[in-house]
Amino acid sequence: MITRDLRQAAPRDIYRILTSLVIPRPIAWVSTLNADNSVNLAPFSAFMGIFNPPMVAINFARRKDGALKDTHRNIQQRKDAVVHLPDVPLLGAMHACGEDVPEGDSELARLGLETVPADVVGSPILLQAPVALECRLNQEITLSEGSTLVLLDVLVAHAREGIWNESYDCADARRWNPVARLASVSGPNYAGLGERLTLAPPRLPAKN
């Protein structure tokens, strides 16, 4: 077994190693409002769901110059965001949103994406996204210099009608193909869900 001691490793090495091991990672495609009310849209792969209470957690690093990323700054100022989960048909647009663009340049205009108003928050919903979670800032936790964990309360959940299973009142994983982030070895690399596996309820073998 290959072993790497992370206690003395450089941050860049830690990131490379852990992001290659903790896979697949769901991608948060986050819309927020800038100070001038223009829309910012950016993807983040350090993202997880918390289900009781309903929340999502996104880890924000800072820019190379030490400034907050636009999405993080907007959440601090506006106190809300909409977290979308992209599917495979949106992979190219989502990936392109990871590019740093000049302030005032619109990702939406460049990529031909549309938004609609959210129900309860100010940040808009990306019309083409299969899933959208309207969120409000709960708290921020400083993890280290340059790293902040942002906790967002999920207020309203939206899903494309075609992926919804009415019998179970939830999204059906067989009806859509969300995008996951993989390690960046010769990457960036992404994946869809691929083969779905359904098992019987867990049961230990009988003792001899």
Image (cartoon, rainbow, N blue to C red):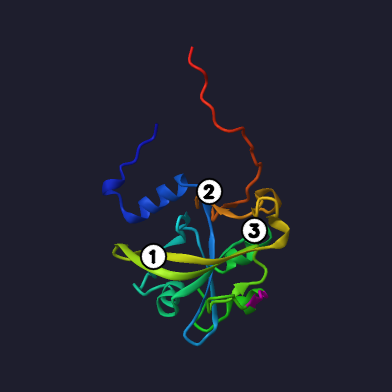
In contact (CB < 8 Å): disc 3 and disc 1: no
Position of residue 6 relative to residue 38, above or below, is above
The residue labelled by disc 1 is 61
The residue labelled by disc 3 is 87
In contact (CB < 8 Å): disc 2 and disc 3: no
Q: For the magenta stretch, what is the residue range?
A: 112-116
Residue 146 picture location, percent across and down: 33, 66
Q: Residues within 10 Å of mark 2 (few under 14, many from 20)?
A: some
Q: Is residue 141 left or right of residue 77?
A: left
Q: Which of the marked residues, 1 or 2, is nearer the chain's N terminus? A: 2
Residue 78 picture location, percent across and down: 45, 79
The residue labelled by disc 2 is 24
- Most frequent secondary structure within the magenta stretch: loop
Residue 187 appears in the rendering: yes
Label 2 element class? loop
Instruction: Check disc 1 and give the amino acid type.
Output: Ala
Residue drawn at (68%, 75%) of the image: 112
Q: Is residue 145 left or right of residue 119?
A: left
Q: Is residue 101 left or right of residue 67?
A: right
User: Residue 52 sits in which quadrant?
Assistant: bottom left
In contact (CB < 8 Å): disc 1 and disc 2: no
Between disc 3 and disc 1, the foreground one is: 3
Q: Which of the marked residues, 2 or 3, is nearer the chain's N terminus? A: 2
Label 3 element class? loop
Residue at far left of view: 8
Residue drawn at (44%, 74%) of the image: 75
Query: Gap between marks 1 and 2, in whole Å?
Result: 20 Å
Q: Is residue 148 left or right of residue 46?
A: left
Residue drawn at (66%, 74%) of the image: 113
Q: Nearer the viewer, residue 164 or 166?
A: 166
Query: Gap between marks 2 and 3, in whole Å?
Result: 14 Å
Query: Gap between marks 3 and 1, in whole Å?
Result: 25 Å
